[in-house]
Amino acid sequence: MTLTKRDLVIRIAEETGLIQQDVFAVLQKSLDYIVEALAKGNHVEFRNFGVFTIKTRKARIGRNPKKPQNTVTIPARKVVKFKPGRIMKKKVTG
């Protein structure tokens, strides 16, 4: 089962008594700020949940499995990494 943004909005609205539109606006704005911080190269840290960081993957050589003689240069790129916090790790792994 997948937990979607819509599922979160409904659950939070039911538990808090807030209007779903207000909950959606706050959740969306929070996600926008997280993406904005990561785009600037900043770390995003939520205590006991985890840390989002930006890492740069080095450029590398790739090959087509069907034609291994053809090589392709894969350029360096930035990727988002997530390191779970202590409490999340305990709950997920048991």
Image (spheres, grey):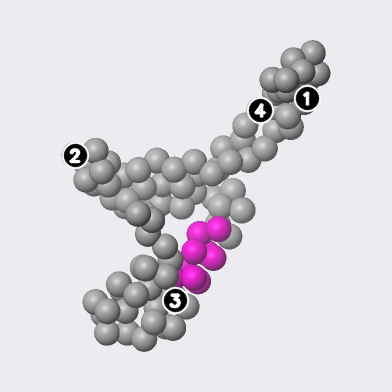
Amino acid type, residue under disc 2 in the picture: Gly
Specify whether residue 34 is painted magenta. Answer: yes
Which of the image's four quarters has the C terminus? Answer: top left
Q: Nearer the N terminus, badge 2 or badge 1?
A: 1
Q: Residue furthest top?
A: 69
Mark-to-mark CA distance, 4 and 3: 37 Å
Mark-to-mark CA distance, 4 and 2: 35 Å
Q: Nearer the N terminus, badge 4 or badge 3?
A: 3
Q: Horizontal placement of 37 versus 25: left or right?
A: right
Q: Nearer the N terminus, badge 4 or badge 1?
A: 4
Residue 28 appears at what percent x and percent y? 49, 70
Viewer can see residue 61: no
Amino acid type, residue under disc 3 in the picture: Phe
Q: Which residue is mark 3?
A: 24
Q: Which residue is mark 4?
A: 58
Q: Horizontal placement of 21 versus 77: left or right?
A: left
